Amino acid sequence: MAETVAKEQPTVKLTIKDFQSDQDVRWCPGCGDYSILAQVQRVMPELPHKKENYVVVSGIGCSSRFPYYVETYGIHGIHGRAAAIASGVKIANPELNVWVATGDGDGLSIGGNHMIHMLRRNLNIKVMLFNNEIYGLTKGQYSPTSRLGQITKSTPMGVVDNPFVPVSLALGANATFVARSMDRDPKHLQEMVRRADGHRGSAFLEIYQNCNVFNDGAFSTWTEKDTRDDTIVYLEHGKPLVFGKQKEKGIRLNGFTPQIVNLTDGKFSASDLLVHNEKDSTLAFILANMIHNPELPRAMGVYLAIDGTPYEELVEQQIAKAKARKGEGDLQKLLEGDETWVVR
């Protein structure tokens, strides 16, 4: 098991106002981004970090305006490069608390390659992927998570691409923390932000975010009060998968296939159900793939949370070993040494 390290402690008590910038928030009225911003600003003051150590990095897209609205250090980068920029920031100064705000287009299309390598390296960076299944900033083209058959500005006859499942992608990239939440479930989203921050390593949090202009209601089945109890199962470590308005349904495994069972007819009880284990990567994939069966509920919560030494710590260890063996570097000596040449 990876050793634990004590986190820094802020010297003054912080409040939500400490994380609210003076910039006017310029998302469309009713956008789910407002809720995500509010929940993050509510949680940040209680986290064990000095305010001056926060850095929020983004690329391009509606979600990528996030750094303007959070009163921390921030970088509004170029399209798809948030993960690469954040990696450089974290490696250069491992003490910083680095967050990435990205979208399904920015993070999984042009930025997909950077994203998977950042996750596989296990940098101690927290990724919030706002998934609205559309390109909102550029006015409604289909994205890597748009559903098959979806009519958009760029697919007038329907999407024919198979969409990414973001949590499956993160699991496949060997992220050590993978979770999912929603803009319309504030308390759950706050808890997922806390869990992501407390994880030592790469943390990937997919957030269902409603784009009320170009893809309104994409997640209504799972967000509306009259349907969500029957369409969502919340993942809690060590607890059976139970859902339904009266908690009358559960999920059991038939081999490796999840299936819904009734808990009221006497045939099955809670002891027959699948018990969530967030340390089991195989189970995490099974739960992520429930998305492909419309009859199964959508899983919300922490899919995977396992230990692993963060990449930046391994880099620091290598640098320390090199210095111990060869001493501190001398740039001038290197430039004037024998291993130089002149190109004519």
Image: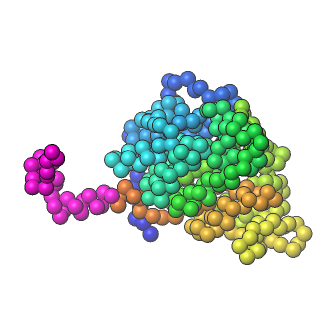
Q: Is residue 193 left or right of residue 162?
A: left
Which residue is at the far front?
A: 344
Q: Is residue 93 left or right of residue 333?
A: right
Residue closer to the observer: 85 or 261: 85
Residue in the image at 15% along x and 58% along y: 327
Q: Is residue 65 left or right of residue 325?
A: right
Residue in the image at 66% along x and 31% along y: 139
| 133 w.r.t. 22: above or below | below
| 339 w.r.t. 74: above or below | below
**Quadrant of residue 133 within the rendered picture:** top right
Residue closer to the observer: 115 or 314: 115
**Quadrant of residue 273 within the rendered picture:** bottom right
Percent position of residue 185, x then y: 69, 44
Residue in the image at 61% along x and 32% along y: 137
Q: Quadrant of the C terminus?
A: top left
Query: Is residue 92 visible from the viewing direction of this image?
Result: yes
Percent position of residue 73, x then y: 42, 35
Magenta residues?
Answer: 315-344
Percent position of residue 155, x then y: 72, 41
Q: Is residue 183 magenta?
A: no
